[in-house]
Amino acid sequence: MVAPLPFPAIDPVLISVEIGGLTLAVRWYALAYIAGILVGWRILILLMRRVSLWPGARPPMRPEQVEDLLTWLILGIVLGGRFGYVLFYQPGGFWAEPLRILRVWEGGMSFHGGFVGVVLASMIYARRYAIGGWALLSLADALALATPVGLFFGRLANFINAELWGRPTDLPWAVAFPGIAAQDCPGVVGICGRHPSQLYEAGLEGLLLGAVLLLALRAGWLRRPGALFGLFLAGYGAARFVVELFRQADAQFLTAENPLGHVLVLAPGFGLSMGQMLSLPMVLLGVGLIVLARPTVPR
């Protein structure tokens, strides 16, 4: 049996400064969100400036509008991500101390919740600035192109935080994550190695999905409003569904009768996790958008 790889000695806190008895910490997790948002912002601006990419050479919004949209997107990501985590993974867990919902530096963000938050924020913004019809779908396409880089940074930060690790395995690239919970592997003698599922997600949801979206962009998919958005939904949903097969279920879903943490048990030892349950509708909606998307000529 091959010994698992040691977890790299990376402190989740990049810089910690004490000012007047108050400790201010800069964490990799927070920096990942900031970097993802800033890079996504620049991608959106570049897309809006490349008018030849869009139907009838008409982007859904002006480059200078992106900065206003960014504020709405940040609110959607943070509030949606945190409330989604509470609703899907820890219902009732935070209500004793509601302000903990806003402590994003502690971790506990749901992509599906953040996705819903971004959709709602974008729709509110679009309504205020009369962006509708094909332009609203084109805006969704642009946001889809800007998202994988944030997913990549976020999953790397999950790895640095030694959270959301995978199920026990003896594969050569298994990682010995630190902590009592990570080393609590029934039936495993000695150091427990686990799938580095955060890196699987960084590769699939960030690098691979981003590359596929760029290829579709080069193939002219932006001229079919909704097609790139559909490709993102289907691609992310499929990637997340697969990674859930290797990812350790959240502790609140684990029981002696249900050691794999399935939310929907279809048969003994077979079922769907919460992440898979939330990803399946994304795949179906994404495929539908791709099939229905047609080239558009704005009037």
Image (cartoon, rainbow, N blue to C red):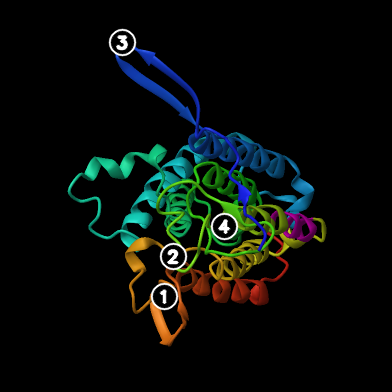
Report the span colored magenta. Answer: 210-217
Displayed quadrant of residue 227: bottom right
Q: Residue at x 33, y 72 (%)?
A: 255
Q: Earlier in the sequence, mark 4 or mark 2?
A: 4
Q: Tell me if mark 3 has few (under 14), some (14-19) or many (20+) residues whose alpha carbon lies within 10 angstroms of its own.
A: few
Residue 256 coordinates in the image, percent (x, y): 33, 75
Q: Which residue is mark 3?
A: 20
Residue depicted at x 53% and y 60%: 166
Q: Quadrant of the N terminus?
A: bottom right
Q: Residue visible at 69% across and 59% down? A: 172
Tell me where residue 127 appears, x and y as whole percent.
Answer: 45, 52
Of residues 188 and 232, the one nearer the viewer is: 188
Select label 3 or label 4 by which is in front: 4
Quick one: label 1 or label 2, which is nearer the N terminus? 2
Q: Residue at x 44, y 65 (%)?
A: 249
- Whole-Å distance between the Cαs marked 3 and 4? 42 Å
Element under label 2? loop
Distance from disc 1 to disc 2, alpha carbons, whole Å, reads 8 Å
